[in-house]
Image (cartoon, helix red, strand yellow):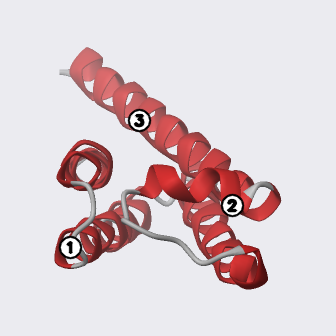
Amino acid sequence: MKNNARALRVTAATLTWIAALMIGYVGFSYLFTPLATAPSFGLPAWPGPEAAGFLNVKGVRDLVSGLIPLALLLSGQRRALGWSLAVISLIPFGDAAVILVNGGSVMAALAIHTATAVVVLVTAALHLRISVISQNR
């Protein structure tokens, strides 16, 4: 049982780090090369250079979305981390919905955004499970 709990912790922490680093990279990309990064999002059209600031806003959102889970993980707040990740998963689910409603790439909506949301939700569930195991000791 103890080895299973450890494996669960390692898996959850690893998934958290991977997700945080990936969304952090996306955030930096939207901050520093927004016009080059935007087409990979999945929408059919993006604003021109005069509106690149809107893409920078997305960069800030993505960067902070990666920092919040890391702060909670590093402080050992597994239950708060689980609930935060569950809420944060609404962002990629919402992104997928926006792409689909606006005639964007179905492949990007599903393969990038929905898949990300599912991984974040699974990671949330793992952290919530860890918090229950820790309380029962």
For mark 3, does the 10 Å Cα neighbourhood hold few (<14), some (14 to 19), or many (20 or more) residues? some
Where is 61 relative to 71, above or below?
A: below
Task: Identify the mark nearer the N-term, 1 or 2.
Answer: 2
Q: Residue 97 carries which label?
A: 1
Mark 2 vs mark 3, CA separation in Å: 29 Å
Name the front one of labels 1 and 3. 1
Q: Residue 35 carries which label?
A: 2
Q: Position of residue 50 (x, y in %)?
A: 77, 83
The quarter of the picture where residue 94 lies is bottom left
User: Which residue is more in the foreground, 116 or 39?
Assistant: 39
Mark 1 vs mark 2, CA separation in Å: 22 Å
Q: What element carries label 3?
A: helix
Task: Identify the mark nearer the N-term, 1 or 3.
Answer: 3
Please, what is the three-letter code of the amino acid marked with disc 2? Leu
Task: Identify the mark nearer the N-term, 2 or 3.
Answer: 3
Q: Which residue is drawn at 51% across and 55% down?
A: 39
Report whether 79 appears left or right of 135.
Answer: right
Q: In which quarter of the image is the C terminus?
A: top left
Mark 1 vs mark 3, CA separation in Å: 24 Å
Q: What element carries label 1?
A: helix
Where is 51 relative to 48, above or below?
A: below
Name the front one of labels 1 and 2. 2
Q: Residue 15 carries which label?
A: 3
Residue located farthest toward the top when viewing the structure as drawn: 3
How many marks the image carries: the answer is 3
Q: Position of residue 107 (x, y in %)?
A: 21, 45
Q: Residue at x 64, y 60 (%)?
A: 67
